[in-house]
Image (cartoon, rainbow, N blue to C red):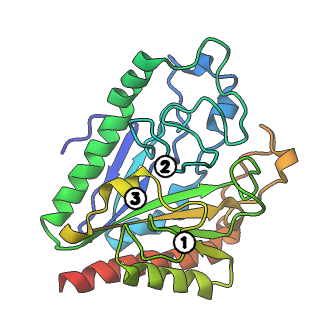
Amino acid sequence: MTNTHDWLQIHRGQAPLIVSFPHTGTELPASHVDHFVSPWLARRDADWWVHELYAFAKALGATTVRTAISRSLIDVNRDPSGATLYPGQNTTGLCPVTTFDNQPLYRAGHEPDDAEIQYRRQTWFDPYHAALSNEIQRLRAQHETVVVYDAHSIRSLIPHLFDGELPQFNIGSAGPSGAPDTSCDNALTDVVENLCAMSGMSHVRNGRFKGGWITRHYSNTANGVHTLQMELGCRGYMHEPAPADVDEHSWPTPYDPEHAAPVRNTLQQVLGACLEFATRRNA
């Protein structure tokens, strides 16, 4: 497949592992930027620096798929029908109109209507998922088992979305808490959870973040596609200000490789475990 979109970044590896980065983008097209209350607010909820945190994935032979477009424009990890993935909980939609803190994203009268949402789907959502689907098909032609790992992060304290401080590692396999995994084999999630526990940092399995549309949509364990989401608390690799101090002067803080080292080391083990799981299945 030839990538004809400069905002869509695909690195092709040959290992049975794909790492998806649906929320690390911050680009706002000139045609849309003035519709938002402010460019900073439209970028604030990005998964800051996550693609840099996982830069080691390419050396493992993993394929990576990333959009550079801001999630405030369109969220490629949401159900395209607009149905909520988390019934009964506060969340944001396919084309969000509020921030994670429930602040309006758009200037009055500039919210996307149905025609605009359809345009954004065709322009950004559909090409991202065409790329991800193509990479899954390419690797499944080479390997009986492939792991799709969806990489995320979020500020650790967002009262509108969850109570208290979010655990450092939030493992999502689309299953109810304490029940069997849905999106991947339990054996894979067990190993990932054990690695997170060994880090000494907080973790949860299918807690607040059980996996978004990518995790749920692409899972096909009967045909060798196992999916897993990892949501990180940003504090593990960034210096997070207190919620009341988050403004355009304090956020985002720069990526700090030294501060991120403990989390990155665990993530290297986690991706290694995903690769080992698939490799053993393919033996």
Q: Kindly identify the residue that appears in the image at 61 percent across and 61 percent down.
A: 208
Nearer the observer: mark 1 or 3; the answer is: 1
Nearer the observer: mark 2 or 3; the answer is: 2
> Helix, strand, or loop for circle 2?
loop
Q: Tag on residue 177?
A: 1
Structural crowding at the residue carrying mark 3, measured as other residues with C-alpha within 10 Å and reported as few (<14), some (14–19) or many (≥20): many
Q: Position of residue 6 (x, y in %)?
A: 36, 35
How far is disc 1 from disc 3 in space, using C-alphas? Answer: 16 Å
- Under mark 3, the amino acid is Thr
Mark yes or no: residue 224 visible. no
Q: Tag on residue 215?
A: 3
Q: Quadrant of residue 36?
A: top right
Q: Kindly identify the residue that appears in the image at 56 percent across and 33 percent down.
A: 96
Left or right: where does residue 41 sit relative to residue 279? right
- Under mark 1, the amino acid is Ser
- Under mark 2, the amino acid is Leu
Mark yes or no: residue 88 visible. yes
Q: Which residue is mark 2?
A: 85
Left or right: where does residue 61 sit relative to residue 229? left
